[in-house]
């Protein structure tokens, strides 16, 4: 046995030694491994974009966000975008714990009131709803009572939007137009009602959240496709305007998500998934497979609103694995395209995430920040 092993191993050992003593040309002939793609540090990218928001839009003297970068604010009716800009600051604070971000909370709380004529109230219910939602987020991350008090002040007024005189129910868009039953005033109100219920546990808030959902689902939602239509006009025979925007898709997703978290009823989750799927398939730029350019002004904020509530849905454990995989891939693809093709000088972001020449304002930059803060989450 030992002799057989000796006969086998000695020649083998010599062969290995000779190979090891040969010239280095043999290793040079081996193919060089392809370099691995560098992993994006999304926290760093998000930080740079959100810092750009503060640097170029924050009006430190007045305590609100300017409408355009690096210029004094001349817009008189820029109330609702303030909420979304502050939401990004809240995102950054939750990501970093930085006192620099938290220091803006109180200044903004007072600044936007002063900017709006020393009042949080507005003729547009949806404007009030967005400010209310941001106040709830400020309360959630600080537990400071003044933010909840402001949210409750607004919520008490917003609830007057519900009326059955027109369209059989639904939340009016404007106080001066009680017949204007828009998706943009119903979805956010449903989210507020659900979140108020989570904080104060008032059955009336949950009841209103369900009524809003039922009305919007019955009148502005197409369950066969997942499309959320723009509005119903109670002055013109309850006619429905069938425009579809990422904004309204997002608020419907958010309302369904909040109700699912409270009740566990799967219909809400199914509707949220279907509305999200419709957005990906029908409201994307087909060339780049990213959310489409919806312009500046109000439209500049639309994509960011969808992304915010879409991101909450993605993190829901009860979403089917195949849907979650598809949704996460889509969200990250949008971020990759924005990073590679859409970022402009000084980390500013325009209306088109695949073009670094598109127009920039507060809304477009905020939407991009929402996306980048979303993909920076550890829970995604």
Image: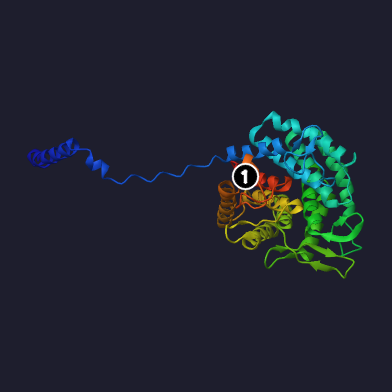
Residue positioned 78% across, 61% down in the render = 216
- Left or right: 181 as drawn, with respect to 333: right
- Left or right: 108 as drawn, with respect to 56: right
Q: Position of residue 365 (x, y in %)?
A: 69, 45
Q: Position of residue 284 (x, y in %)?
A: 63, 59
Residue positioned 77% across, 46% down in the render = 81
Foreground of the two, 128 or 256? 128
| Total tally of numbered discs in the picture | 1
Q: Quadrant of residue 121?
A: top right
In this rendering, does residue 263 appear at all?
no
Is 61 located above or below residue 362 in the figure? above
Q: Position of residue 187 (x, y in %)?
A: 77, 55
Q: Position of residue 161 (x, y in %)?
A: 88, 54
* Mark 1 crowd level (few <14, some 14–19, many ≥20, 10 Å Cα): some
Q: Secondary structure at mark 1?
A: loop
- Look at mark 1 in the image and give the residue it sits on: 344
Q: Quadrant of the C terminus?
A: top right
Q: Quadrant of the N terminus?
A: top left
């Amino acid at each position: 046995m030992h002799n057989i092993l000796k006969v086998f191993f000695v020649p083998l050992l010599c062969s290995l030694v000779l190979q090891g003593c040969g010239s280095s040309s043999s290793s040079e002939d081996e193919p060089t491994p392809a370099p691995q793609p560098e992993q994006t540090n999304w926290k760093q990218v998000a930080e740079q974009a959100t810092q750009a928001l503060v640097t170029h839009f924050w009006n430190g003297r007045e305590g609100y966000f300017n409408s355009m970068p690096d210029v004094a604010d001349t817009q008189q009716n820029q109330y609702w975008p303030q909420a979304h800009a502050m939401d990004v600051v809240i995102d950054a604070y939750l990501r970093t714990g930085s006192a620099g971000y938290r220091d803006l909370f109180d200044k903004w709380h007072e600044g936007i009131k002063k900017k709006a004529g020393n009042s949080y109230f507005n003729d547009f219910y949806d404007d009030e709803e967005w400010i209310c939602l941001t106040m709830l987020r400020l309360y959630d991350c600080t537990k400071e009572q003044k933010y909840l008090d402001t949210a409750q002040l607004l919520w008490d007024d917003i609830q007057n939007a519900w009326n059955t005189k027109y369209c059989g129910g639904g939340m009016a868009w404007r106080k001066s137009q009680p017949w204007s039953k828009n998706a943009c005033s119903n979805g956010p109100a449903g989210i507020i009602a659900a979140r108020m219920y989570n904080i104060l546990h008032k059955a009336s808030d949950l009841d209103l959240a369900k009524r809003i959902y039922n009305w919007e689902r019955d009148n502005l939602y197409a369950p066969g496709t997942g499309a959320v239509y723009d509005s119903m006009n109670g002055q013109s025979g309850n006619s429905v305007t069938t425009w579809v925007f990422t904004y309204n898709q997002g608020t419907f997703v958010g309302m369904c998500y909040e109700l699912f978290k409270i009740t566990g009823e799967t219909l809400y989750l199914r509707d949220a998934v279907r509305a999200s799927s419709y957005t990906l398939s029908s409201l994307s730029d087909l060339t780049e497979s990213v959310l489409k350019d919806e312009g500046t002004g109000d439209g500049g904020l639309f994509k960011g609103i969808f992304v915010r509530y879409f991101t909450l849905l993605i993190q829901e454990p009860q979403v089917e694995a195949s849907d979650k995989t598809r949704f996460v891939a889509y969200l990250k693809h949008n971020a990759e395209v924005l990073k590679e093709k859409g970022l402009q000088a000084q980390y500013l972001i325009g209306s088109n995430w695949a073009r670094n020449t598109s127009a920039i304002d507060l809304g477009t930059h905020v939407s991009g920040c929402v996306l980048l803060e979303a993909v920076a989450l550890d829970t995604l």
